[in-house]
Amino acid sequence: MACPLLTLSLVFARPDDWQPLTPEVIAALPESPAVFEVANLVRTVLFIERAHGKLRERLTSLWQDPTKLPVRPGGHYFRYELTAREEEALQKRLGSYRKRHRGVLPPINRLAERLRPVERPVERKVERPVAEAVIFSTVPAQA
């Protein structure tokens, strides 16, 4: 006799465990500052980002927009770390990833970096003193 598959228990899921990126799982997340990683079915990390203080909202927007996170066979999985210092935790995770991958960022982070507009240094307008006007004339000077 066949048995139904066990359902995902969100009660026992820890933040550092890989969880499926689905609306049901996202709905159970806290709306807190965090850093998260998104991976494919075999847990190859595709994206590392911070939540900007709203983990649930950020993951919902990623899940809903295929231009930000392209659809993949087997779906996506994620894990997260709650932290009050998102930028510091993000740099730590990116540094750790780069160390294990010969200095390369995850694929979606690389793409986002290439698409980000280059910030050019702001040119300051330098005011130069105006030279006294010189008048040229074709009329000979009178003595």
Image (spheres, rainbow, N blue to C red):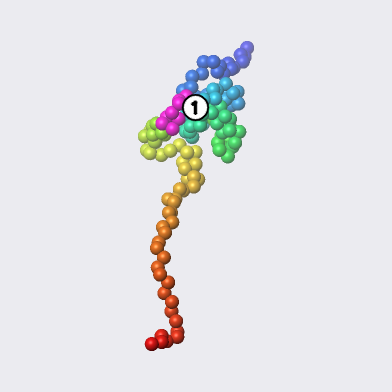
Pick whichever, 72 or 70, lies toward us.
70
> What's the residue at 51%, 15% (across, down)?
12
Q: Which x, y percent locates residue 1? A: 63, 12
Instruction: Give residue 142's quadrant in the image.
Output: bottom left
Residue 25 locus on image (x, y percent)? 57, 23
Q: Tell me: 128 left or right of 7.
A: left
As helix, strand or loop, the secondary structure at mark 1 comes to loop
Residue 84 is one of the magenta-drawn residues: yes
Q: Residue at x 55, y 18 (%)?
A: 10
Q: Quadrant of the C terminus?
A: bottom left
Count every numbered label the image shows and give the total: 1
The range drawn in magenta is 79-89
Residue indicated by mark 1:
33
Percent coordinates x, y for residue 68 in the rendering: 55, 38
Residue 25 belongs to magenta span: no
Placement of 35 over or under 104, stated as above or below = above
Residue furthest to the top in view is 1
143 to 2, vertically: above or below: below
Q: Residue furthest front?
A: 143
Q: Residues within 10 Å of mark 1 (few under 14, many from 20)?
A: some
Residue 85 position within the rendered picture, expressed as x and y whole percent measured from the top left:
43, 28
Q: Left or right: 116 with respect to 143? A: right
| Residue at image point 47% right, 24% down | 82
Up-down relation of residue 142 to residue 131 (above or below): below
Q: Amino acid at mark 1?
A: Pro
Q: Is 1 or 68 nearer to us in this picture?
A: 68
In terms of image quadrants, where is residue 65? top right
Q: Residue at x 56, y 27 (%)?
A: 56
